[in-house]
Amino acid sequence: MIQFIRKFLDSKIGVIVAFVFLGLIAVAFAGLDVSNSGLFGGSSGGDRAATVGKEKVTTADLTRSANRAVDQMRQQQPTITMQAFLAENGLEQVLDDLIDRYAISGFGETLGLRAGSRLVDSEIANAPMFRGPDGKFDRQLYLQVIRQQGLSDQLVRDDLAQGLLAQQVMAPVAFGAAMPNDLVLRYAALLKETRKATIAVLPSEAYAPAGNPNDAQLKAYYDKHKNEYVRPERRVIRYAVFGAEALGNPRAPTEAEIAARFKRDAARYAASEKRRLTQVILPTEAAAKAIAAETAKGTSLAAAAGSKGLAATTLGPIDKAALTTQSSKDVAEAAFGAAKGATTAPVRSGLGWHIVRVDSIEGTPARTLDQARGEITAALTAEQHRTAVMDLASRLQDEFDNGSSLADAAKTVNATVLETPALTADGRVYGSANETAPAVLAKAVPTAFSMEEGEPQLTEVDPGKTFLIFDVKATTPSAAAPMNEIKPALVAGWKREQGLALAKAAADRVLAAIRKGTPVATALAAEKKSFPAPDNVTMNREQLAQMGGRVPGALALMFSMAEGTSKRLEAPQKMGWFIVQLHDIEPGKVAKGDPLLAGASRELGNLNGREYEAQFRRAVRAEVGVKRNDAAIKAVRAQLNGDNADNRD
């Protein structure tokens, strides 16, 4: 998962996405820990993790961002721990991202770039997590969500503005990046290259000592590898389930209320026009004019954009007001002023230069009160139900604030309090292979792992029908297991490590014999151990690419060696050593017009663009000036790792 995030943030669009949505991601996922925002103010090293130009990245910023990164990773890998994140150098990655963010946005300001309030408003309004039942932006919901995460409206807006400013700086950097055709041809031929090799393995267990380690040896091994035996955080959840009957019977909307709503939303029921559009946004006017010139000659907008390494996006059906919010008034005026099938001239917005093609026009006739009655009645009923839920939540929350317990709240709604065994963050019962949390807690478990103990919450299980009150009764933090509870695993690990060292020496002996001309099988037999038979492998790079990101290390080594050489490689999880002898390399051949060339060109263009971005980020850092405070960073790492806390089982 950490590798996935690193690869994503290193991609051509990943860095821009990370900049723009960093603030909203913090809101979208529960679990942001802001209660300790001032935790490091008095720690060794001060409160500055780094200084970027005139701005500082505080230890609180770094702590929040590290917690945020782990919370995001838990969406895909629920049992990931902070200790594992830190062991994979995650804190450094987070700090680098923060430094780049401050540096690039600050550099953008020196260029005169800005992210206006209207653009920030648009980003917030278009965020799905802030939409109400009618699909529109709900300001009360927005404020409620950010308050739940300990954020303020100003903090969210500042964060978004900074990210949008960084996007404006970064977008042109890799635009149009491409590789010369000769390099593309050589690279494509490389993809068809075939290699033949012999791969052998010397298992650690073949050299592992027969006797067990003494206490001192076992303790030293445990201290060195403690992070490999970390148990996940566990929580005991108490909960009570109740139905919609606790809300009472909602009354039906009156005729007066229906008429008032129809009058209030008159624009919604009036005749309207929506359009389906194809749009390309360019960073410069010159680039936009080049695309426009191609479309004027009959080239489709999508094809013209594709020739420049860009992709056209489709919008709609969308009305003029929505397009104005998403882009600008000028873009909306141009798009809604053009005829069906027409393409607009380049028009500028805060995002860049837009070229829009009108694909279709959809007109909607006006509706009368009678025609809209059913829709309005349903909306008012849903609102009343939502109000009832909010009133109940408010009433229960008031009870909690006044010291009421989960049991007291359960009595209010006539429900029974139940309790789970210790659960891990993925919803499994700790220590059980197959047992999981009750299905009714499926949505609550992730939230429960971001809550404090004894702070009940209310949630809907089946909207409008089934509700859940839950809290965390007990938390067992993630920590290394005590030695006495995992002694068999430690003994096996120690033996494997000792065997690995001896297997390495054996691999060196085998390599020396192979390099003198001894066949692989003969060199292995000289060790007088029981080994798996060597594999003769013939493979091309296209087959290697089909493995995606799961290429075994021995095969990766095979495709990075010179012909006629032999090398060794440590096997995963200290299981032994691979020996790879490369016999032959057969160069690949690519004919002109081969579809592989187009794919290779795009891939190399993306790689080239990422290199431009990396060079640009380094140049910006040098321009604005960056100073790291290693003492403060070390203090943050220690606190996040729980170094000052006692280990618990």
Image (cartoon, rainbow, N blue to C red):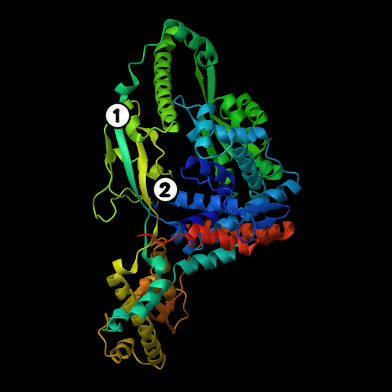
Q: Which residue is mark 2?
A: 75
Residue type at mark 1 is Phe
Q: Is residue 452 visible?
A: yes
- For the residue pair 170 and 485, the one nearer the viewer reads as 485
The answer to whether 165 appears left or right of 214 in the picture is right
The answer to whether 527 appears left or right of 63 in the picture is left
Q: Residue furthest bottom?
A: 516
- Sequence order check: which comes first, mark 2 or mark 1? 2
Residue type at mark 2 is Gln
Q: Which residue is mark 1?
A: 242
Residue ID at (29%, 74%):
492
Give the quadrant of the C terminus. bottom left
Label 2 Cα crowd, 10 Å radius (few <14 / some 14-19 / many 20+): some
- For the residue pair 123 and 563, the one nearer the viewer reads as 123
- For the residue pair 424 and 208, the one nearer the viewer reads as 424
Q: Is residue 462 visible?
A: no
**Secondary element at tag 2:** loop
Q: Residue furthest top?
A: 256
Give residue 114's position: percent from left, percent from top.
71, 41
The answer to whether 578 appears left or right of 599 in the picture is left
Total numbered circles: 2
Question: Which disc number belongs to residue 615?
Answer: none
Give residue 377's position: percent from left, percent from top.
40, 13
Residue ID at (30%, 34%):
240
Residue ID at (40%, 55%):
477
**Secondary element at tag 1:** strand
Label 1 Cα crowd, 10 Å radius (few <14 / some 14-19 / many 20+): some
Where 472 sits versus 216, above or below? above
Give residue 505's position: percent from left, percent from top.
39, 87
Give the quadrant of the N terminus. bottom left
